[in-house]
Amino acid sequence: MDWKSVNFDWNRARAFLVTAEEGSLSAAARALGMAQPTLGRQVSALEQELGVALFERVGRGLTLTPSGLELMDHVRAMGEAAARMSLSASGKAQAIEGTVSISASEVDSAFRLPPIIAQLRQMAPGIDVEIVATNSESDLRRREADIAIRNYRPTQPNLVARKIRDIHGRIYATPGYLDSIGNPSTPEEYCEADFIGFNRSGEFIAAMTRFGLSLTQANFPIVSESHLVQWSHVRHGLGIGIMAADIGDAEPDVAQVLPDLDPIVIPVWLVTHREVHTSRRVRLVFDLMAKELARPFYG
């Protein structure tokens, strides 16, 4: 359909635009300060006027149909033009406001995100940030988060992903703990050492084999699914654990174990949903995170 040949009410177009950016009628209604049923009627009226479905429901949220995606570009341009006219008349700078939800691992949430969020607060104080600190995968398609940091390339459709860089995983322990086990110098000499892992399954043991370490479940007297708990126990001299090298090297209480061995290479991807990426505030946060995550962590 040639959208430019269709004349429709701007209030309906704005209702569509904000609903697409917010991901649900309830969130859009709050953003516009209007009743949800009224907003829903405006969106439905626009669909009837155009003769197409603009949204489909996914869980508790809404996702754009192909027709909705096509219309989005035109309506966004209209909205930006209207905003520029208003700003020109008032002489005010355009504010970016609203909430952005970021899903990241416990380690990324605790170490990498704080300096980025500090910059964001200076750049756009109107943006509120919700950090979902989890080592599980948040479903961006169901709007469990707006942006996610992941260590693998996503394959789901309708996701926008950018490879940021590779980080190196290395193993660490305190000098005191290494002294207590005789400061081993070869992988074979670590077969009796204590390691702190995720669980007692073979996953962590398999990861350690990449360092040339032949371990069994007996090497793991302490386990925790929390990466921060693992790292805290390493820092307190209770055993050996793995950490991203830029974070581990910035910790003065620990030292690399077997530093001459090849590291585990861990990719870093930044991901958002295709429709959410059309939001100005999400794009701003996404671009800032992409820039800053490319830098090593310096503590």
Image (cartoon, rainbow, N blue to C red):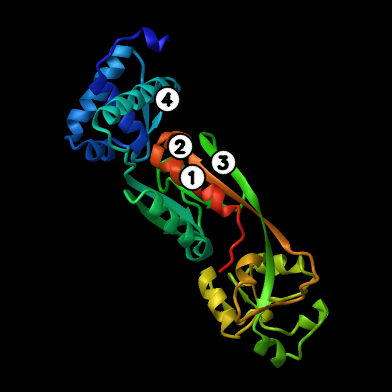
Q: Are marks 3 and 1 in contact (CB under 8 Å)?
A: no
Residue at position x 37%, y 55% from top?
130
Distance Cα–Cα, label 4 vs label 3: 20 Å
Residue at numbered disc 3: 161
- Up/down of 119 relative to 30, above or below: below
Residue at position x 55%, y 47% from top?
290
Identify the secondary structure beneath mark 3: strand
x and y percentages locating residue 158 in the rendered image: 51, 34
In the image, what residue type sits under mark 3? Ala
Task: Check disc 4: other Cα within 10 Å, few if <14, some if 14-19, many if 20+.
Answer: some
Question: Foreground: 1 or 119?
Answer: 119
Identify the secondary structure beneath mark 4: loop
Task: Check disc 1: other Cα within 10 Å, few if <14, some if 14-19, many if 20+.
Answer: many
Q: Nearer the viewer, mark 4 or mark 2?
A: 2
Image quarter of the N terminus: top left
Distance Cα–Cα, label 4 vs label 1: 23 Å
Residue at numbered disc 4: 65
Can residue 57 be seen here? yes
Q: Are marks 4 and 3 in contact (CB under 8 Å)?
A: no
Identify the secondary structure beneath mark 1: helix
Residue at numbered disc 2: 277
In the image, what residue type sits under mark 4? Thr
Q: Looking at the rendering, which quadrant does residue 61 occupy? A: top left
Query: Which residue, as the protein is rendered here, is positioned at the far front?
Result: 91
Q: Nearer the viewer, mark 4 or mark 3?
A: 3
Task: Check disc 2: other Cα within 10 Å, few if <14, some if 14-19, many if 20+.
Answer: some
Can residue 44 be seen here? no
In the image, what residue type sits under mark 2? His
Q: If you read the primary sequence from the N terminus, does the residue marked by circle 4 or circle 2 appear first?
A: 4
In the image, what residue type sits under mark 1? Phe
Q: If you read the primary sequence from the N terminus, does the residue marked by circle 2 or circle 1 appear first?
A: 2
Residue at position x 34%, y 38% from top?
22
